Image (cartoon, rainbow, N blue to C red):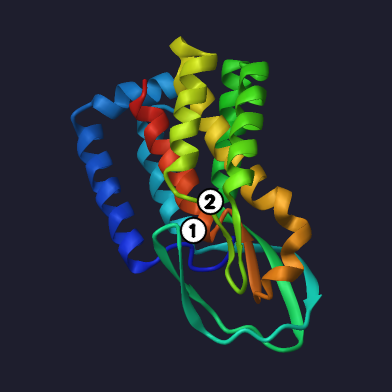
Amino acid sequence: MIYAPFTLLLLVLLLVLLGVFIILVEMRVLAYAYRKVGVGPRYAFAVMLLSLLGSHVNIPIYSIPVGRVLRPHALTMFGRTYLVPEASEQGATVVALNVGGALIPILVSIYLLARTRLYWRMLVGVAIVAAVVHSLARIVPGLGIAVPMLVPPLVAAGVGLLLAFRRAPPVAYVSGSMGTLIGADLLNLGRIAELGAPVVSIGGAGTFDGVFLTGIIAGLIA
């Protein structure tokens, strides 16, 4: 839930995954998978690319006053190392919406919800993923909310297969992306003051990778 949503190592990993994704699309494997998800194959790559590029774009929503001093330092959690930026002693924390990790997944989820009309299945799926993610989410002072990156997509995949076996991909995508945003970020908005960070981005930092991987795995379980 903040700025620079991933480290260099994770960026390389995501780019490798994107490279594999491109190859699979060319082989028409994921083209079929994303038809099952509900996103046309011609748009699947665009969604993934925009998600990566948009991960560095934050839209400010509002700000709250803060008064904590946090020096730049590295912090390791869930096997990942986060670079915590410096926060000023007096100022404000800007709450923003991350384009790649929140806005695009929200728009895709709305599209899939309207297209498939699997309302109750998606609602139940979102609730389950949100509950699991919220129980595992950890506050990282100066950075944001950290979540194990493989938990959201794996739980979402299981939920999708359980609730709508034949139509699992769209249910998995919506459950994973929306459940992660709600469980990790939205349900912790009341604890923003504890972060002491200059910018808190919904869908950024420790939640972006979970949302991004959910999109890939949702397509692969088709």
Check disc 2 and give the amino acid type.
Gly
Q: Position of residue 165 (x, y in %)?
A: 46, 12
- What number is the disc on residue 218? none
- What number is the disc on residue 101? 2
Q: Is residue 45 visible?
A: yes
Name the foreground residue: 95 vs 22.
95
**Label 2 packing within 10 angstroms: few (<14), some (14-19), many (20+):** many
Q: Position of residue 73 (x, y in %)?
A: 49, 82
Q: Is residue 204 above or below residue 175?
A: below
Real-space Cα distance between discs 1 and 2? Answer: 6 Å
Q: Quadrant of residue 21?
A: top left
**Residue appearing at x 22%, y 34% in the figure:** 24
Give the position of the N terminus as an image quadrant.
Answer: bottom right
**Residue appearing at x 47%, y 46% in the figure:** 210
Q: Is residue 145 left or right of residue 194?
A: left
- What number is the disc on residue 55? 1
Q: Quadrant of residue 34?
A: top left
Name the foreground residue: 22 vs 162.
162
Q: Earlier in the sequence, mark 1 or mark 2?
A: 1
Q: Are marks 1 and 2 in contact (CB under 8 Å)?
A: yes
Q: Quadrant of residue 40?
A: top left
Q: Is residue 222 above or below residue 128?
A: above
Q: Is residue 51 left or right of residue 71?
A: left
Q: Is residue 38 visible?
A: no
**Residue appearing at x 62%, y 71% in the figure:** 141
Mark 2, secondary structure of its residue = helix
Q: Is residue 64 left or right of residue 22?
A: right
